Amino acid sequence: MKASQSLLLTVQQQLEFLLAEKQVSRLWLAFSGGLDSQVLLHLLAALRENLPPLSAVHIHHGLQTQADAWADNCQQVCLSLKIPCQIVPVVIPQDTGESLEALAREARYQAFAKLLQPAEALVTAQHADDQAETLLLQLFRGAGAAGLAAMPQQAQLGQAWLLRPLLQVRRQQLADWAKQQQLAWIDDPSNQDRRFDRNFLRHEILPSLQQRWPSLVDTLNRAASQQAESWELLQQQGSYDLQHCCGTQAQTLSVKALLKLSHPQRSNALRVWLKQCGFLMPSARKLLQIENNVLQAGSDRQPLVCWNNTEIRRYRDNLYALTPLPQQPPKHKLEWSLNAMPLALPLGQLRASPTTDKGLCLPLNTQLEVRFRRGGECWLRHKQHQSLKNCLQAAGIPPWLRGFLPLLYWQDELIAVPGVGISDKVLSPAGENNWTLQWLKKIPA
């Protein structure tokens, strides 16, 4: 069998396996225009009769002077193959101190996740040599089983799928096929820049290693598969342990329950929990900070550990995993009435609904003011003037949320706090035409 037919058959078989039992409505190819994605684009075009509808997406990073020309080239190639191509520009933050490679990759996958609809799938052109490099890079970073498992053949991408049909194919096979088919592709000069870890490994380290161990790439891919199996077992154990560590709030963990686990079990359970919540794995150093600074902190403390768009917080016995909170709400007052549309807030929205149960009793068009905490607020509750701070503590509202909590004022007096209570002055028993207030929180998670 010719090499070109062999590669086509391999990709066909891999796609059949990856698409089995999935109701995929559209395939999107991550198309950079480079050798790997150029080959995969043409292979998918050859197989399209037996595939879901096919589109390509090119991420325009804007990091090279040729970026516009590359986007135009990708459009033209796709046009010649009658494959729709969407160009998606992204902005890469500069001077953050983080790796430009990592920032570009994160921006790409955020764009992919935003573009793809449920039941769609993204196909990428990572191959066996990429997998070997990924394993070594993770090893050099001190990764555990999750990192050493490298890239899975399939994974969730938001509500869509991420598929990698070339993980069993070598880079040289792709280059040979491209030459046979007389393909042209984009050569990104940054791929030769040895300042980037992957490029240094690819051009300086791996060639020497392969001279000594010719089957190194196959060996590293086999090791990645074994680590993937180990990570699967660890996830199963972690999921079992998490069943006994649930906190009192959704997606939280009980600190007391966690501390009953052995240290290895606890570390594993935290990794599995963070993965289930959609966060990036913490480094060993960050995991140690969670252990020492958060889990071991007194219940009256407000510890915080941060990394890569992730915040670990604790309130009382609950451990929270969140994305960073937005800016604090404005100090000025917001006007609102009970029959108005829901009011957009920094964390969610405020809504009023009619009820015949006990609730807020005010005329329909009453103009209210929505304010946010400044400290020292009091109100009449249960026939006593009470401190709002004490009421929030009694309601179990975490300190970092209290500044976002909408406070409703009428005639310059605090009358209601959604989820906490209503002032005696406007509280009416059941059976009247009352209102119930809801703060539909959109807490970062």
Image: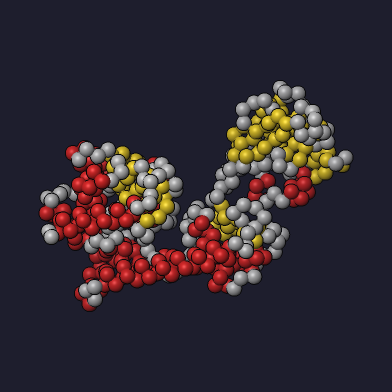
Q: Looking at the image, is 352 positioned above or below residue 22?
A: above
Q: Look at the image and name its color scheme.
A: secondary structure
Q: Which residue is at a point 62% across and 31% down the rendered structure image?
A: 342
Q: Which residue is at a point 43% across and 56% down the rendered structure image?
A: 97
> Quadrant of residue 263 in the image?
bottom right
- Residue 430 image position (x, y, % from top left): 80, 33
- Residue 93 image position (x, y, % from top left): 41, 48
- Residue 267 image position (x, y, % from top left): 54, 68
> Quadrant of residue 333 in the image?
top right
Q: Looking at the image, is 7 positioned above or below residue 370?
A: below
Query: In the rendered image, which quarter contains the N terminus?
Result: bottom left
Residue 307 seen in the figure:
no
Q: Give the side of residue 237 with respect to residue 68, left or right.
A: right
Q: Give the side of residue 243 with respect to residue 123, left or right.
A: right
The one of 377 and 142 positioned closer to us in this rendering: 142
Q: Which residue is at a point 83% across and 36% down the rendered structure image?
A: 424
Q: Which residue is at a point 24% across and 51% down the rendered structure image?
A: 40
